[in-house]
Amino acid sequence: MATQRTPIISGNWKMHKNHFEAIQAVQKLHYRLDREDHESVVVTVHPPFTDLRSVQTLIESDRMKISLGAQDCHWEDQGAFTGEVAPPMLAKLDVAYVIVGHSERREYFGETDETVNKKVHAVLAQGMTPIMCCGETLEEREAGGAEAKVEGQVRAGLAGLGGDKVGSLVVAYEPIWAIGTGRTATSDDAQAMCAHIRRTVDEAFGADAAARVRIQYGGSVKPGNIAELMGRDDIDGALVGGASLDPDEFAAIAQYRLH
């Protein structure tokens, strides 16, 4: 089944790069990726909101195969929500993928499984693909509650969707204890949890959805560990943080099959 899923490598820039720096970074990334790379893997970049229009224009004018992504959105299409960005605004910028429920959003901004679920539905309604994040803390893992935590996030975050929709989206497993810490889950750890996520999707939404849904690993992904991670049956891509800020490093991650 794994060979039927197109791998997806996503770069989450978080709160880095103004729009001038974003243009330079995407241009450099474009130069380092060739036609065979894009035929083998979907590459997405997720700049800050202020960079999206500039990157969109660049991708369109140079006919790049890189997909534009956003880091978050609100769940309403419009309204009195100062500082928020609505899904239709992103869709008008040809955003293809939206990260939803990243651990930093949950931890620092109080996002709950309920709000994550609303955002998943809102993103899908605008024809975009959610990358829904889930993951456990170190304390939860050490207490033996990692699988239950992640399963609960997956079931709650995808609640109310049909199997066809679930099969079309992306789930990103990001062990919180491995994000920006330099610590990385072993490929065995990552595979075990990604397999658990796929089993959860199977139980909740059916075998077809489980076979089609793409599951990313996120947590200190680098050129040195990507090939091993991508060699596992239930890992279909990576949600890359710090390493995605360097076009050379990020290109090397996207070219994992050459390692």
Image: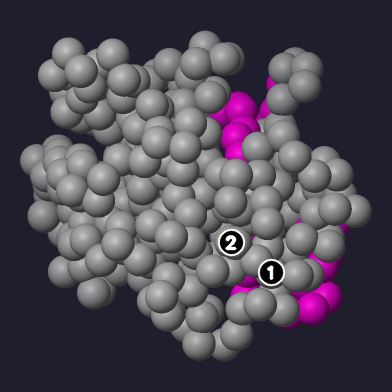
Considering only vertical position in the picture, is 124 above or below 75? below
Left or right for 148, reference 94: left
Q: CA distance from mark 2 to mark 1?
A: 8 Å
**In the picture, which quadrant includes the N terminus?**
bottom left
Which residue bears the numbered disc 2? 250
* Residue 199 among those drawn in magenta: no
Residue 234 seen anywhere in this rendered image of the structure: yes
Q: Residues within 10 Å of mark 2 (few under 14, many from 20)?
A: many
Q: Disc 2 residue type?
A: Phe
- Residue at x 25% of width, y 16% of height: 140
Which residue bears the numbered disc 1? 29
- Residue at x 61% of width, y 78% of height: 33
Considering only vertical position in the picture, is 211 above or below 15? below
- In terms of secondary structure, where does tag 2 sit? helix
Left or right for 186, reference 88: left
Residue 7: horizontal and vertical position, in percent?
38, 66
- Residue at x 53% of width, y 79% of height: 38
Considering only vertical position in the picture, is 76 above or below 140? below
Q: Residue furthest bottom?
A: 35
* Span shown in magenta: 53-79
Q: Which quadrant of the structure image shows residue 230?
A: bottom left
Residue 37: horizontal and vertical position, in percent?
51, 80
**In the picture, which quadrant includes the C terminus?**
bottom left
- In terms of secondary structure, where does tag 1 sit? helix
Return the disc, 2 or 1, that comes first in the chain's sequence: 1
Q: Residue furthest right?
A: 20
Q: Disc 1 residue type?
A: Leu
**Badge 2 vs badge 1, beta-carbon distance below 8 Å:** yes
Q: Which quadrant of the structure image shows residue 25?
A: bottom right
Q: Residues within 10 Å of mark 1 (few under 14, many from 20)?
A: many
Front residue (pair 52, 81): 52
